[in-house]
């Protein structure tokens, strides 16, 4: 079953050439797919379109078998699809690591005790317990990246969208991230400049070129 389907997506900013001009994409249940292409080709834009964070001038977005067009259509999508942003500072805004990770579950209606139980379990699995009470903005770039992933996983998404997840990671933390992602059950759509990283996480690639998505 296709979890995500994009058809004929057009994105153009005023006074600029089209970024996407008929792009299409399908992500199937259990699939792990890399989206490649040069800088500025529209990879991050396509991820935002999937979540309704950017509205195409033309095209169809389907998620979990339903067309999504209005803002209200995407509320469910954002509960079921997690996006790890390219810049961790765009995603971390609470004073401490535990509060950042708990924020999503609390918004889903979990009690404080339930949310903290999720926090502790997730930090244990990710081997990040030592960061639990740290001040988020004082973390290293690599630590922020792993905490960002934890905030997304706390929502228990069915699909992960990963936008350059190795940004700021040293080799040790990149190896840890690879271990984490390989063990996860979710379908994954990955944007990464690293061919070696992509090969360890995904099994197929598509390329954005000239505003369209092409098989590789």
Image (spheres, helix red, strand yellow):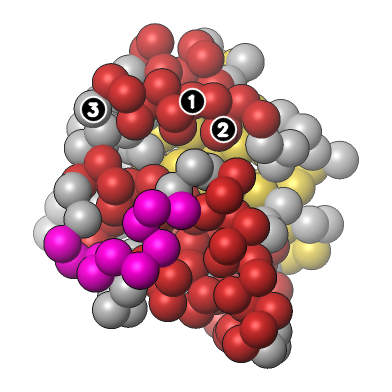
Quarter-wise, where is residue 147 in the image? bottom left
Determine if the magenta segment contains residue 85.
no
CB of mark 1 within 8 Å of CB of mark 2?
Answer: yes
Q: Distance between the residues labelled 3 and 1?
A: 12 Å
Q: In this view, does 190 lie above or below 121?
A: above
Q: Position of residue 29 (x, y in %)?
A: 79, 38
What residue is drawn where x is 29% and y is 52%? 144
Q: In which quarter of the image is residue 148?
A: bottom left
Judging depth in this view, the residue of 210 and 146 nearest the camera is 146
First reached walking from the N terminus: tag 3 or tag 1: 3
Please provide the residue range marked out in magenta.
129-138
What residue is drawn where x is 55% and y is 33%? 180
Q: Position of residue 190 (x, y in %)?
A: 48, 34
Dot 2 lies on which element? helix
Up/down of 33 relative to 81, above or below: above
Residue 170, disc: 3
The reply to whether callout 3 and callout 2 are in contact (CB within 8 Å) is no
Residue ID for mark 1: 178
Residue denoted by label 2: 181
| Horizontal relation, residue 201 to residue 137: left or right | right
Q: Do the residues labelled 3 and 1 touch (CB within 8 Å)?
A: no
Residue at the extreme front of the image, as rendered: 130
């Amino acid at each position: 079953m296709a979890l995500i389907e994009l058809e004929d997506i057009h994105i153009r900013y005023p006074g600029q050439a089209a970024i996407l001009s008929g792009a299409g994409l399908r992500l199937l249940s259990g699939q792990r797919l890399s989206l490649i292409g040069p800088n500025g080709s529209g990879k991050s834009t396509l991820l935002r379109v999937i979540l309704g964070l950017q509205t195409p001038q033309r095209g169809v977005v389907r998620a979990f078998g339903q067309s999504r067009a209005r803002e209200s259509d995407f509320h469910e999508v954002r509960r079921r699809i997690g996006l790890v942003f390219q810049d961790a500072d765009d995603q971390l805004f609470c004073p401490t690591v535990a509060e950042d990770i708990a924020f999503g579950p609390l918004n889903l209606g979990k009690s404080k005790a339930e949310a903290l139980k999720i926090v502790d379990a997730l930090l244990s699995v990710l081997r990040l317990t030592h960061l639990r009470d740290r001040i988020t903005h004082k973390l290293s770039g690599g630590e922020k990246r792993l905490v960002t992933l934890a905030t997304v996983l706390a929502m228990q998404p069915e699909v992960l969208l990963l936008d350059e997840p190795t940004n700021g990671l040293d080799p040790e933390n990149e190896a840890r991230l690879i271990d984490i992602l390989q063990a996860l059950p979710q379908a994954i759509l990955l944007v990464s400049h690293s061919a070696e990283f992509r090969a360890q996480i995904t099994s197929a690639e598509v390329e954005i070129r000239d505003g369209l998505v092409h098989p590789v």
